[in-house]
Amino acid sequence: MEYFWIILIVALASLIKGITGFGFALVSLPLLMFWYAPKELIPILFLCNLFASIIIVLQKKNRKLVNKQFKSLIIFGALFTTTGVVALHFISDNGIITVISVFLIILSILSFINVKYSLKLTDISYKIAGALLGFVTGFISISGPPLALFLNSADTDNQTFREVFSWFSIVTACIALMGYALLGLLTTETIKMTLLFLPILFAGTYFGKRLNSKIPPTIFKKAVVSISLIASVLLLIK
């Protein structure tokens, strides 16, 4: 019965990723933490996200999508991912669960009240954002919502959004996974679970893309936020 729920959660998270472009870790992490410790789960989600992002960047492009400013965002993200990895290694599982729960509750509330940001972005803004997002990525693997807010503030089009998002995910995931391996957080069990999740991830993403044009993404985004909020509150009071 446990595996049924795990597969269902991964399938749902993959479907939402296919429709909205992100949300895999946002949905799956708080729910899967009812069965797995964060230090077991986060490397698995990184591996899954890495494979999904590689598929996106391998797609044919008509123009250059990552400019100098976005490159600095990605580079600083990679550099500060290491600090998040170190934090994950030294903080207890209970501490990590509390941090993740509070972080997701705040993000969910901001999404529900439809907070919008209007920022004047300079070159230093991209570097600061990259550093903060890199730390969050290395620590809890969830950079999607805050990165999406930043890219929206930068007024990116859909193609650029997906491309920058994917390159940020690939670079930070590679750095984080090397750190996890050095700190002993990347195990054979991690690889086995990733191999179990990957077919479900690819299938869910594929069908999600097909549903993208038929079902309004806003409905699924609200579903993502609702699931994340409920799961995070339950984890916090667990």
Image: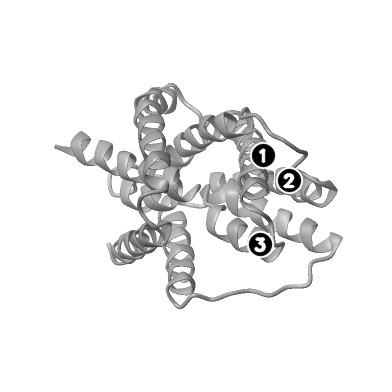
Q: Is the residue 117 above or below the residue 169 in the image?
A: below
What type is the residue that disc 1 sits on?
Trp
- Where residue 101 sits, quadrant-wise, is bottom left
Which residue appears at 84% of the width and 65% of the height? 122
- Left/right of residue 64 with respect to residue 106 in the rendered view: right
How far from the left and from the top, in percent, is residue 38?
A: 42, 46
Q: Which mark is residue 167?
A: 1
CA gap, disc 2 and disc 3: 13 Å
CA gap, disc 2 and disc 1: 7 Å
For marks 2 and 3, the one nearer the N-term is 2
User: Which mark lies nearer to you, 2 or 1?
Assistant: 1
Determine whether the residue tagged by mark 3 lies in a helix, strand or loop.
Answer: helix
| Quadrant of the image containing the N terminus | top left
Q: Which residue is mark 2?
A: 74
How far from the left and from the top, in percent, is residue 215?
A: 35, 53
The residue lying furthest to the left in this view is: 1
- Where residue 50 sits, quadrant-wise, is top right
For the residue pair 191 and 222, the one nearer the viewer reads as: 222
For marks 2 and 1, the one nearer the N-term is 2
